[in-house]
Image (spheres, rainbow, N blue to C red):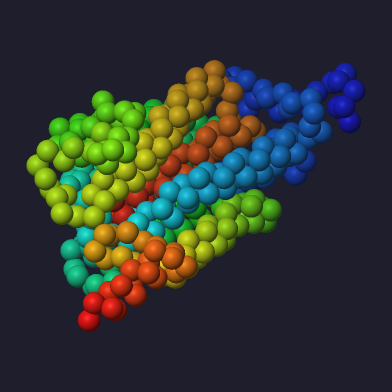
Amino acid sequence: MSHDGHHSVVIPAPGPEFVPHTVAHHFDTPVQEFQAAKLGFWLFLATEILLFGGLFAAYFYFHEAYPETFRVGGHQLDWRLGALNTSVLLLSSWTMAMGVRSAQTSQKQKTLLFCGLTVLGAVIFMVIKFFEYQAKNEHGLVVFSELFAPYDAATGSIPWFKDYHGVMAGLPHGHLFFAIYLTMTAIHGLHVVIGAGLILWIMKGAAKGRFHAGYFLPVDLVGLYWHLVDLIWIFLFPLLYLVP
Amino acid sequence: MSAHDHHAPGDLQMGHHHVSSAKLFFNVLMALLVLTVVTVAASRVDFGAANMLIAMGIASVKAALVIAYFMHVKWDTAINKIVFLSSFLFLSLLFIFTLADHATRRWDNDLHTMRTPVDKQWVYRQHEHAGDH
């Protein structure tokens, strides 16, 4: 219908504080635009599950192989900070769900408020994570300045794993737990940062009145991304901080 | 219930969408926080090998709550459900074959290394040990 480009489909704004949405020219209807974008985003989220899935497979493999290394390694992390960060992420997942709901019901101020609270949750999470990493750095369990130093095959020593207090002494492959801890939490942390950036972008659009009951697609998709970040952490918390 | 109820079908919007009540979202949040406390409490009790299964079981319930309600999958279209939930099917294949590999390996407990069942060096070392007696 609109393939000729002579006219485009426009979703009207529900009120003066909102702006109408023009459906991209390669879509016939708003429904088609919504369903196409949503299907594509679910496919992307499926690949995210598989990205973290590979790391979880590595965790389970080495946990089975060296249970004592993982048990003692897990005790080096502060489970209280882990539990606190879990609560922060769960709360931020709730504020995000409420943010999407506010967009769906054309409540502009509430959309901005809940998205802002979600970003605040992301900041608190990363600040706590920073202090955790700092403690690991001080104890030589993950020496960040040596992270990219070459491995010395002659001595077999791992540059980033110094273990100043010898907490992992005598355990097989003591560095392994911290290698998996850092890889999984750093990739997860990267998702937290990207998620927070996307939510700020959503807030910019919401402030202009772009999202309302007629059109809230970007809010919905960014919300899904943020819930995925929470989903991954739900498994990371018991596996890393409360090693079974 | 829905904010869209006053619109007639075919109105210019993205279609009809289920809008969850704020009460439902709050209840889900409370359930998730309670289950986090349960996770910590369960880790304090020694159930042996079952600790891992219990921890992953609780995490799976939490994940199901997030997926069904926060991510709205419960009200999503069949194709979107299939696309997202199938990723967990493929994930289980990855776990099953990875752990099958682990289960069929031999372990050199002195050196804390693993060897494949067909490792010549391993077989040779076993014979050597047998000859010592």
Q: Residue at x 81, y 33 (%)?
A: A28
Q: Position of residue A64 (x, y in %)?
A: 33, 63
Q: Residue at x 75, y 44 (%)?
A: B9
Q: Position of residue A121 (x, y in %)?
A: 33, 34
Q: Residue at x 40, y 45 (%)?
A: A230
Q: Position of residue A114 (x, y in %)?
A: 41, 33
Q: Do we see residue B20 in this rendering?
A: no
Residue farthest to the bottom, as pictured: B133
Q: Is residue B92 left or right of residue A236?
A: right
In this rendering, is residue B8 above or below B107?
A: above
Q: Is residue B76 left or right of residue A235?
A: right
Q: Nearer the viewer, residue B110 or B95?
A: B110
In this rendering, is residue B53 above or below A178?
A: below
Residue farthest to the left, as pictured: A165
Q: Position of residue B5 (x, y in %)?
A: 64, 45
Q: Is residue B28 left or right of residue B77?
A: left
Q: Quadrant of the C terminus of chain B?
A: bottom left
